[in-house]
Amino acid sequence: MTRHAEPADRSGPASGPIVHGFPHLKTIQASLTALYRRLSYDTISTFAVSVLPDEVRVPPDADIYLGTQQVARTIVQHLRLPEARMIVAFRDMVHAGNVELEAGPEYFIELNSRFKEDRRDIGACLAHEVMHVYLHRLGLEFAGTRDNEILTDTASAYLGAGWLLLDAYREESNVRGDRLVRSASKLGYLTPEEFGYVLAKRALAFGDDIEPWFSSAQARDAYRAGMARAQADLRQPPLARCGWAGRRRYAADRRIVQRGDGVSPVRAGGYAFEGGSPLRVSFPCPTCHQRIRVPVRGRFTARCGVCGSELQCDT
């Protein structure tokens, strides 16, 4: 039996501040590469439409167990997992949820009992746990718990269910007695901006922009920050859209290598020159982050061998 746990959300000053920014970016990008290598672009493109908000929320007047099982079934169907019975239970525990991956035909998911009182993030927690099932069936995992959980969050967001994990990020103010209490909460291992980054990469690849679905202003802000970072990936040299400053820096680096001054291959902005004749340059694909190697020979269209993206380059 294998068990995977979703970290509990954090709220209030005792839990410490929520981390922001992009501290896990390299692992996220490695996760995207692994997904494309394992699934192919054709398979990933079948998830181009995200799960709809109304399909993954438990109404306040619905039976908590039946409603939660229905949301779990929706996510299972979205991921095209084999039909199997999803048993969902609630109990007091440190984590927000966990899943047991059995050899049999059913999956057992436990959720923190707090979700019985606050149903808003049931779908988010299930998206993470069911993705563990999906990746387990694919045989795709990273070494180490931290990296594997980042892979799970990234896959969940990129395959159309994990937008719920960013929607679980919120900052709220509540009156308790005569005091105004401020709290912040989130789910998942990625920062809010990193979830925004993965969802933005998905939107740029498939046109599936889910910003109107977010229920909190904080989630929308994180999505926009992630979108800005994802768009910056499209403007790195030697891509033709890199802009004047990037083009000038790239040209200077290329001259240093071409002079053969004994300088090591230049690495800036993600690209690296590789000596030899003809001179070559490698750079990460802005879609799947597989490194692409092309000759230095001016303007042309390169094609990523993993995700199939066609990239206008000026090398």
Image (spheres, helix red, strand yellow):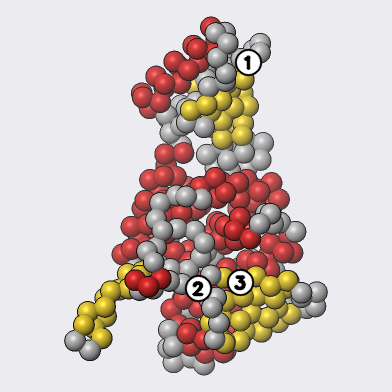
Q: Amino acid at mark 3?
A: Ala
- Badge 2 marks a residue whose secondary structure is loop
- Badge 1 marks a residue whose secondary structure is loop
The disc label shown at residue 8, or none: 2
Q: Left of 178 or right of it: where is 101?
A: right
Do callouts 3 and 2 mark residues in contact (Cβ within 8 Å)?
no
Distance from Cα at disc 2 to Cα at disc 1 = 49 Å
At a point 33% along the width and 63% down the height, the residue shown is 218
Q: Earlier in the sequence, mark 2 or mark 1?
A: 2
Q: Amino acid at mark 2?
A: Ala
Residue lying farthest front? 14
Q: Residues within 10 Å of mark 3 (few under 14, many from 20)?
A: many
Which is more foreground, mark 3 or mark 1? 3
Asked if residue 277 is positioned above or below residue 67 in the image, the reply reads above
Q: Residues within 10 Å of mark 1 (few under 14, many from 20)?
A: some
- Badge 3 marks a residue whose secondary structure is strand
Q: Is residue 123 visible?
A: no
Residue 103 position in % (x across, y down): 80, 74
**Which residue is at the front of the view, 99 or 264?**
264
**Which residue is at the front of the view, 114 or 312?**
114
Do callouts 2 and 1 mark residues in contact (Cβ within 8 Å)?
no
Q: Left of 62 or right of it: where is 47?
A: right
The disc label shown at residue 5, or none: 3
The residue labelled by disc 1 is 275
Q: Residues within 10 Å of mark 2 (few under 14, many from 20)?
A: some
